[in-house]
Image (cartoon, rainbow, N blue to C red):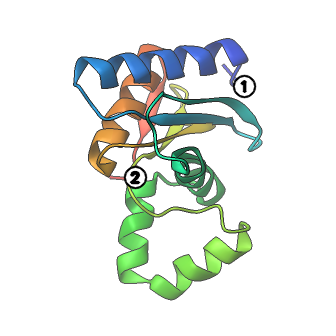
Amino acid sequence: MTELTLETAQTIITNALKAAREKSFKPLAIVVYDARGALKALLSEDGTSIKRAEIAMGKAYGALALGVGSRALHKMATDRPYFIASATHAVGGQLVPVSGGVLIKNGQGGILGSVGVSGDTSDNDEIAAAAGIEAAGLVFDTGA
């Protein structure tokens, strides 16, 4: 697979949501971008707070822009806060350096896009994103 299709993005979102419901996570917003940074899919469950979608977008877009999962961005923010502040500025503010922004990769390690999830703890957001990617038969990279 060389590009992320709408059908695949929908599969990722459906299965991320399924995993979240099975684990009784709080209501989530889930976003999928393709490798070009084009928005492929977005959903906000009933009951999410009003900016959850934007936070999910920042997790996913930041991971995609820097080519690492947002767990790695969190470590960078701790170790090199000026770099993350500058990178956030460079990407127009769309960088949220906490877990829940996960790269979507093919079997050869090529980046196909990213998923961002927000609504529960950052670790749980990441679990939902990874479950959706795995269910689509792809590889996830959290930046761990």
Q: Is residue 33 visible?
A: yes
User: Few, some or many C-alpha atoms within 10 Å of disc 2 (few <14, some 14-19, many ≥20)?
Assistant: some
Q: Which residue is mark 1?
A: 3
Q: Quadrant of residue 33?
A: top right
| Labels 1 and 2 touching (C-beta < 8 A) | no
Left or right: 13 with respect to 128?
right
Q: Which residue ends up furthest to the left in the rendered image? A: 23
Left or right: 37 with respect to 50?
right
Q: Which residue ends up furthest to the bottom in the rendered image? A: 82
Q: Residue at x 42, y 24 (%)?
A: 16
Give above or below for 117 relative to 3.
below
**What amino acid is found at the position of numbered circle 2 in the picture?**
Gly
Whole-percent x, y for residue 92 in the image: 73, 68
Mark 1 vs mark 2: which is more N-terminal? 1
Give above or below for 13 relative to 78.
above
SS type, badge 2: loop
Q: Quadrant of residue 4?
A: top right
Q: Residue at x 39, y 46 (%)?
A: 142
Whole-percent x, y for residue 49 in the image: 47, 46
The image's mark for residue 11 is none
- Marks 1 and 2, Cα distance to the nearest angstrom? 21 Å
Q: Is residue 111 visible?
A: no
**What amino acid is found at the position of numbered circle 1 in the picture?**
Glu
SS type, badge 1: loop
Q: Which residue is mark 2?
A: 143
Give above or below for 88 relative to 96.
below
Left or right: 61 with respect to 79?
right
